[in-house]
Image (tube, grey):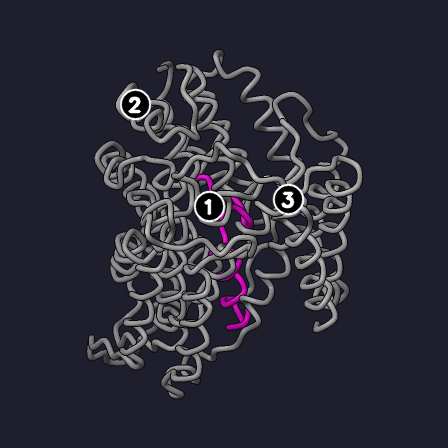
């Protein structure tokens, strides 16, 4: 794997330290890593990339979905090469043909922030061993998932997922089924984090742009409660029938105790969450490290990951069967996803800008949701937020315009916020924690459905009807 890392480092250095043209009119509210990066850049609203450049993204998605099913040995040994190769096609196109290196640098910054957060939360939570000595009943599982949904708004969906997935698996070890993991992804890794900017990356980007911190919880708490209730109700029914079938004549006694090892790692988790806000867009005194594609925030996160692993409770690491395979898989796959999805996102931005005035709350809900299922939900959120603001002649890069928009008509921002977070649960690639939960579960011996199996057996029959009901009750015919 070292040669792939070396290739990425060389490409990164060449990309960062190329000649740049500084902009004199940058918005001071932008992130530290993008505030002055304005190398050769196309106005995608005038000249979008070639539609053919979506092909590498489609090929990568198809291989992610079919590889583990039809050519598992080849895929497991070659997915880093495949991901980097397909990503390189897009990178070379943007450098030599489309001549838009600014988009590449911006995506690199987003990827480093993404992987820094996931890595630090993964490592810090891996040093916390939670043992729940209680019977795996449907009610107990519902309580654990509900607890995960609530705390995902405090430590993020990634933090909550990494903290609870292993004890959840251990508690259900005697009757674990694929649906246990799938619903964990639905509730803890996605929908749960829909109330605060800490919960999910799209909401945090909205916060950086100027959306008030408590805006989402004020406007969508009732939607969140109904959605969580409906998903957990379906889970309870499935788990109840599974429980009835698996109950044996003799059952062991449970103390009901919850044991914690590695408690000091909660301090590391707190540092990581605080560091999320160490950005010039939030704190003006934070220095920029331009032209480096990362900032103080990412340095803190990687440092915490290193220190928390070196000083972790060895019993906790052993009890969690901790290893770096899950985060390695996410890092390699998502470097290709982030790169290949650049033209797809820009084409989406072009179309939403072109037809912004005709877009309704219905379209914002379904458009944001469906694209968040297969594209990164954070930039998808920003694209549709920009289009919604454009309906009223407002600019997303103007901090005051964002403040005006959030008080203008909440229906559009509600639709975009809900869809971006919730629909991330529709596929394995919809949100970063999904893949990590999948990898940890499979390393524990749980056989999960393929990409298409996940969508066909769970997302479409369970989530799609619930999301359709949410649309009908709260967004249908509005805006």
Relative height, residue 241 to residue 26 (above, below) = below
Can residue 237 be seen here? The reply is no
Residue displayed at 42% across by 65% down:
301
Residue displayed at 28% across by 74% down:
132
Q: Mark 1 sits on what residue? A: 425
Relative height, residue 8 to residue 427 (above, below) = below
Residue 164 % position (x, y): 35, 65
Residue displayed at 38% across by 73% down:
170
Which comes before the other along the chain, label 2 or label 1?
2
Residue 268 % position (x, y): 33, 71
Residue that protrudes farthest toward the top in the picture: 358
Q: Nearer the viewer, mark 3 or mark 2?
A: 3
Secondary structure type for disc 3: loop
Q: Is residue 434 magenta?
A: yes
Q: Quadrant of the N terminus?
A: bottom right
Relative height, residue 407 to residue 316 (above, below) = above
Relative height, residue 221 to residue 7 (above, below) = above
Name which quarter of the figure residue 210 lies in: top left
Residue 89 % position (x, y): 77, 47
**Residue situated in front as seen by the camera: 79 or 203:** 203
Numbered marks: total: 3
Q: Which region of the structure is painted magenta? A: 421-446
**Residue situated in front as seen by the camera: 295 or 94:** 295
Q: Mark 2 sits on what residue? A: 404
Would residue 5 be found to the left or right of residue 364 on screen?
right
């Amino acid at each position: 794997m070292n040669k792939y890392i070396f290739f990425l480092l060389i490409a990164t250095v060449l990309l960062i330290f190329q000649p740049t043209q500084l902009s004199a009119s940058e918005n001071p509210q932008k992130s530290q890593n993008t505030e002055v990066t304005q190398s050769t850049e196309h106005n995608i609203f005038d000249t979008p990339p070639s539609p053919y450049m979506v092909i590498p993204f489609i090929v990568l998605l198809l291989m992610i979905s079919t590889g583990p099913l039809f050519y598992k040995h080849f895929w497991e040994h070659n997915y880093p090469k495949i991901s980097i190769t397909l990503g390189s096609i897009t990178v070379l196109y943007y450098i030599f043909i489309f001549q838009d290196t600014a988009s590449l640098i911006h995506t690199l910054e987003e990827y480093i922030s993404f992987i820094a957060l996931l890595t630090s939360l993964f490592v810090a939570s891996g040093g916390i061993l939670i043992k729940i000595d209680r019977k795996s009943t449907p009610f107990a599982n519902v309580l654990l998932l509900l607890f995960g949904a609530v705390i995902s708004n405090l430590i993020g969906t990634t933090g909550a997922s990494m903290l609870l997935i292993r004890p959840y698996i251990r508690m259900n070890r005697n009757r674990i089924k694929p649906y246990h993991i799938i619903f964990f992804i639905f509730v803890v890794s996605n929908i749960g984090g829909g109330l605060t900017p800490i919960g999910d990356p799209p909401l945090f980007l909205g916060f950086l742009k100027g959306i008030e911190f408590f805006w989402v919880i004020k406007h969508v708490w009732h939607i969140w409660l109904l959605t969580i209730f409906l998903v957990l109700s379906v889970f309870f029914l499935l788990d109840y029938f599974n429980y009835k079938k698996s109950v044996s004549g003799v059952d062991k006694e449970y103390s009901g105790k919850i044991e914690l090892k590695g408690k000091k790692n909660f301090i590391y988790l707190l540092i990581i969450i605080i560091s999320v806000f160490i950005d010039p867009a939030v704190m003006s005194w934070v220095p920029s490290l331009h032209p480096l594609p990362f900032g103080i925030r990412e340095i803190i996160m990687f440092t915490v990951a290193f220190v928390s692993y070196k000083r972790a409770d060895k019993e906790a690491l052993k009890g969690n069967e901790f290893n770096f395979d899950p985060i390695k898989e996410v890092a390699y796959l998502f470097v290709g996803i982030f790169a290949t999805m650049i033209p797809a996102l820009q084409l989406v931005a072009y179309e939403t800008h072109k037809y912004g005035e005709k877009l309704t709350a219905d379209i914002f809900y379904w458009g944001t949701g469906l694209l968040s299922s297969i594209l990164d939900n954070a930039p998808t959120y920003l694209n549709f937020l920009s289009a919604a603001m454009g309906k009223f002649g407002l600019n997303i890069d103007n901090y005051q315009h964002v403040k005006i928009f959030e008080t203008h008509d909440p229906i559009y921002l509600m639709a975009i916020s809900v869809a971006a977070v919730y629909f991330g649960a529709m596929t394995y690639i919809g949100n970063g924690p999904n893949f990590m939960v999948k990898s940890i579960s499979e390393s524990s011996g749980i056989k999960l459905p393929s990409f298409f199996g996940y969508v066909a057996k769970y997302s479409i029959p369970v989530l799609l009807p619930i999301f359709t009901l949410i649309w009908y009750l709260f967004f249908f015919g509005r805006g």
